[in-house]
Amino acid sequence: MSQGTSALRRCGRRVVRACWGAVVAVAACVVVSGGDVRATEVGEPVGVDFFEAKIRPLLVAKCYACHSAETKPAGGLRVDERAGLLSGGGSGPALVPGDSDAGEFFARLLTDDEGKRMPQDSDPLTESEIADLRRWVESGLAWPESSLSTADAGEDLSDLYEDLRADHWAWQPLGRPEVPSPSDAAWPVADVDRFILAKLESAGLKPVADADRGIWLRRVSFDLTGLPPTADQMAAFLADDSGRAFENVVDALLASDAFGERWGRHWLDVARYGESTGPSRNIPYPHAWRYRDYVIDSVRADVPIDQFIREQVAGDLIAASRPGLTPAEQDRLLIATGYLALGVKDVNQRFKERFDMDNVDEQIDVLTRGVLGLTVSCARCHDHKFDPIPTADYYALAGIFTSTANAAGVRNKMGGSGLAYYDPDNLIVLHEQGEGPDAGVVAAARERLAKAQEAWDAIRDTPEGLAMRPNGQRVQRRFKVELDAAKAEFDALAGPQSGRQLVHGLRESTTVADTAIRHRGEAEKAGEIVARGYLTAFEVPGAPEIDREQSGRLQL
């Protein structure tokens, strides 16, 4: 084994970082291979996970009452099975995979004839809901295939779950396998090398020859930073004949900004990092960059992966429990909670309870999929079809997050200007503050507000203002929109939050309580209360009891 390879593997600090990178890389693979529901770009094919998270709950809420096995299907159409949608009812096929313009389904959703428009006894579907349905159909009408019954979401799966917990490899405690003894005792440096070499030898193979110094430098530089070495770095390394030449290169690369940026990006993918809400109204998150920088700095600083996760789930509670922290240290922990505050939010969802439960579902999904590699959100509407995760477990976790206030700085609102969706009072204020806005900028904003107010007062409820434009809106509406925008601009510069350093994050809710199972995932259909807790699929030795006076994030 070469000096460079040997030096790399002997360095304990590098082993820790390699493990951190491996955890992030595996989590990223899980998210990608699992079919990330929230991060899918428009037009990208979607699969079963998207169906379970977006489509099935919509069909249950809007269609099952008239078109399922629970009742005599109206018009002969069933939407609780794929075959029913394909065959349709008396009017022919409802949906055609790959062609959302074919079939009767969308024709009935979008018709102007109120007597034919569906759903009949419910609110019309929103634009985002229709867009989700179209994406699902255009992607091929994905539907779960399982040995379990998909028609009966209430089937008792407890016996099957017990078998899975007892026998399935994924749920067994980690063991320590016996370290093999390959015939070549000189090549391995650590136990992991012995496993690799033993497998090679069993296949009649040998390790390839070591790379020369120039190639090694290019490889390690691209691997750690994504960048090639500079000419000066190459010359310095080739001229360094000391015993620490390889260690010096790796130390320098690990300490570089580029290392944190390259490897932090993998976690940001797992965290579904984005700087706007999507999907129906794409409202920017103006302070999201602070969380991005937290991730990059944490990777570069070699923060242990367990600490890294705890900070993001409960950084605010950790900060509150350590009074000796400096303001900068407290702020770092508050910023970390952006992990569960940012993300997709349908701010056009007019029903507050649905908006809140959808956000909780997003938090559960990003945490369990990214950290555990499990699609726990499938259990929002029914017991999980593939993993031993009952609906009660989902709502045990949900209670932790319904007891947590999401200080993302946005609100749900149906319609209005983009600024109307902002809630600047619902943000985390950091301890370290910057300078306030320039006095000249504030004065200019004040002048614009005064002019907008004067223009509004002059036209409000006058014959000219009440006159109708060709687009069906009153003339005075434009003046009111301009006044609202001027007020929002001035408040941002001179209001209570002006000049403050703000961040999207989490805080404890004023109401800490267990939550109820929602029948078929519908926010308004509350059932049995479930105590806050953890997944029961596996045991965690020494797991603390949930603090009944707190949300439970610290124990989670």
Image: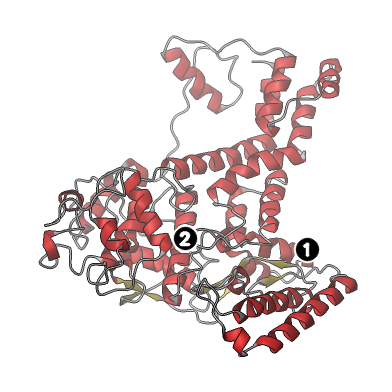
- Give the colour scheme shown: secondary structure
**In the image, residue 335 above or below residue 236:** below
The residue depicted at 76 percent of the width and 77 percent of the height is 490
Q: Secondary structure at mark 1?
A: helix
Q: Position of residue 119 (x, y in %)?
A: 26, 68
For discs 2 and 1, the disc positioned in front in the rendered view:
2
Q: Secondary structure at mark 2?
A: helix
Q: Is residue 425 visible?
A: no
Q: Position of residue 177 (x, y in %)?
A: 43, 33
Q: Position of residue 456 (x, y in %)?
A: 69, 84
Q: Position of residue 54 (x, y in %)?
A: 37, 57
Q: Give 316 or 117, whichever is nearer the viewer.
A: 117
Left or right, 213 with respect to 151, comes to right
The residue depicted at 51 percent of the width and 68 percent of the height is 347
Left or right, 334 with respect to 182, comes to right
Left or right, 51 with respect to 273, comes to left
Q: Which mark is residue 86?
A: none
Quadrant of the rendered image containing residue 168: top left
Circle 2: residue type: Glu
The residue depicted at 46 percent of the width and 76 percent of the height is 352
| Residue identifier under label 2 | 362
**In the image, residue 222 above or below residue 430:** above
Left or right, 291 with respect to 270, comes to right
Q: Give 322 or 500, whichever is nearer the viewer.
A: 500
Neighbours of disc 2 within 10 Å: few (<14), some (14-19), many (20+): many
Circle 1: residue type: Ala
Q: CA distance from mark 2 to mark 1?
A: 29 Å
Q: Is residue 22 visible?
A: yes
| Residue identifier under label 1 | 328
Q: Quadrant of the N terminus?
A: top right
Looking at the image, do the residues carrying marks 2 and 1 touch, with CB atoms under 8 Å apart?
Answer: no
Q: Earlier in the sequence, mark 2 or mark 1?
A: 1
